[in-house]
Image: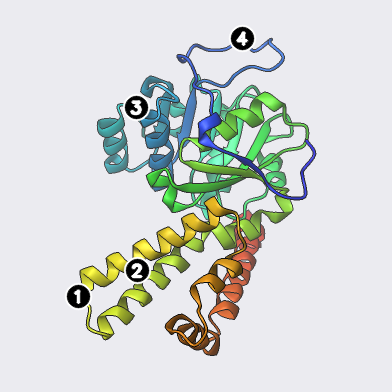
């Protein structure tokens, strides 16, 4: 697959609905993946399951999840009517796409544990931060198609964004299956894998930066006399509306900023203080630091042991 100079974007409006969950014939050249298994039943798995089920993309009986926590298993089974298992290997039975939603620090051990239950016909997907495709292939073998993904927490509301990278030579049908999975929870872009650590530092960690900014804006409102609830509503909706303008109007954020900042007005006075506080430089540094940490998580000697 040729990677364009700018990310390839996919919108959920173009997603194809998967019909039923019959097993495909694996002697077909490009089988359509119809059964999804999740290793780990945490918040990201729940976001994906919720998106798939509520959008009608996949029927609940086509989904399964494995997790050692009985609380998480019971929650997913009760709320979404999917099959859950304490044993990850049992969750993988009959699956066409296996999604590993666990922390990178434990993924090595999890992969080795489930390896006897994996089959080369299964498409393997990992959302572990910093965990490269080559390392995953080094554990499970070179015969698997592998997708590396980085979603973010707004995915739980269907408002996330996920970056995907594919192992070399991955068939188009498998690429589309992975895209379809994440379109259920928001936007999807395809990037070269060398950029995935940067994606993690920007959009993966980015919601926390934005939450901090919303909290700080609300604190400023409270300082100047607004009730807390009112200040938080104003701050959050302002951020949401501004983001929507960037996405829908297609203009550079600097152009939109200049339209708000009239000469000698209130906005330019506030912007001057932001520049004095080095807000932009600090945000850039935050993305840089998170990117470096993602790289460390995927390549630390301790996590290989």
Q: Which of these two is toward me, 141 or 167? A: 167
The residue under label 2 is 235
Q: How is the image coloured?
A: rainbow
Where residue 2 sits in the image (x, y, percent)? 80, 39
Where residue 126 sits in the image (x, y, percent)? 57, 42
Regarding residue 104, the answer to whether it shows in the image is: no
Q: Which of these two is toward me, 265 or 180? A: 265
CA distance separating discs 1 and 3: 43 Å
Residue that appears at 73% across and 48% down: 192
Where residue 204 sits in the image (x, y, percent)? 53, 57
CA distance separating discs 4 and 2: 53 Å
CA distance separating discs 1 and 2: 12 Å
Residue that appears at 45% across and 84% down: 265
Q: Of callouts 3 and 2, which one flags the residue occurring earlier in the amino acid sequence?
A: 3
Q: Of callouts 1 and 2, which one flags the residue occurring earlier in the amino acid sequence?
A: 1
Q: Would residue 78 appear left or right of 216 to someone viewing this image?
A: left
Residue that appears at 47% across and 30% down: 37
Rate crowding at label 2 as few (under 14), some (14 to 19) or many (20 or more) other CA atoms within 10 Å.
Answer: many
Q: Is residue 59 above or below residue 39?
A: above
Q: Of callouts 4 and 3, which one flags the residue occurring earlier in the amino acid sequence?
A: 4
For the N terminus, the image quarter is: top right
The residue under label 4 is 25
For the C terminus, the image quarter is: bottom right
CA distance separating discs 4 and 3: 24 Å
| Image label count | 4
The residue under label 3 is 82
The residue under label 1 is 227
Check whether the beta carbons of the residues at disc 1 and disc 3 lie within 8 A of each other.
no
Check whether the beta carbons of the residues at disc 4 and disc 1 lie within 8 A of each other.
no
Regarding residue 278, the answer to whether it shows in the image is: yes
């Amino acid at each position: 697959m040729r990677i364009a100079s700018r990310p390839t974007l996919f919108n959920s409006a173009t997603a194809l609905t998967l019909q039923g969950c019959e097993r495909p014939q694996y002697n077909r050249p490009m089988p359509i993946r119809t059964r999804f298994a999740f290793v780990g039943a945490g918040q990201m798995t729940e976001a994906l399951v919720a998106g798939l089920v509520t959008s009608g993309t996949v029927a609940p009986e086509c989904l399964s999840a494995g997790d050692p926590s009985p609380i998480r298993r019971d929650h997913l089974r009760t709320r979404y009517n999917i099959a859950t298992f304490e044993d990850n290997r049992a969750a993988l039975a009959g699956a066409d796409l296996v999604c590993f939603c666990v922390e990178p620090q434990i993924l090595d051990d999890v992969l080795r544990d489930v390896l006897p239950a994996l089959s080369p016909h299964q498409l393997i997907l990992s959302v572990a931060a910093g965990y490269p495709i080559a390392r995953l292939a080094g554990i499970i073998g070179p015969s698997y198609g592998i997708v590396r993904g980085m979603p973010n927490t707004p995915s739980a509301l269907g408002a996330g964004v996920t970056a995907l990278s594919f192992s070399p030579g991955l068939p188009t049908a498998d690429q589309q299956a992975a895209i379809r999975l994440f379109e259920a929870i928001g936007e999807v872009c395809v990037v070269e894998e060398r950029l995935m650590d940067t994606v993690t530092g920007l959009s993966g960690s980015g919601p926390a930066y934005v939450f901090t900014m919303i909290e700080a804006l609300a604190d400023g409102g409270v300082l100047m006399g607004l009730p807390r609830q009112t200040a938080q509503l104003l701050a959050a909706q302002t951020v949401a509306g501004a983001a929507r303008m960037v996405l829908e109007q297609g203009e550079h954020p600097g152009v939109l900023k200049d339209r708000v900042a009239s000469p000698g007005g209130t906005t330019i006075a506030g912007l001057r203080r932001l520049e004095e506080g080095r807000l932009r430089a600090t945000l850039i540094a935050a993305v840089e630091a998170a990117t470096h940490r993602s790289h460390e998580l995927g390549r630390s000697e301790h996590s290989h042991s």
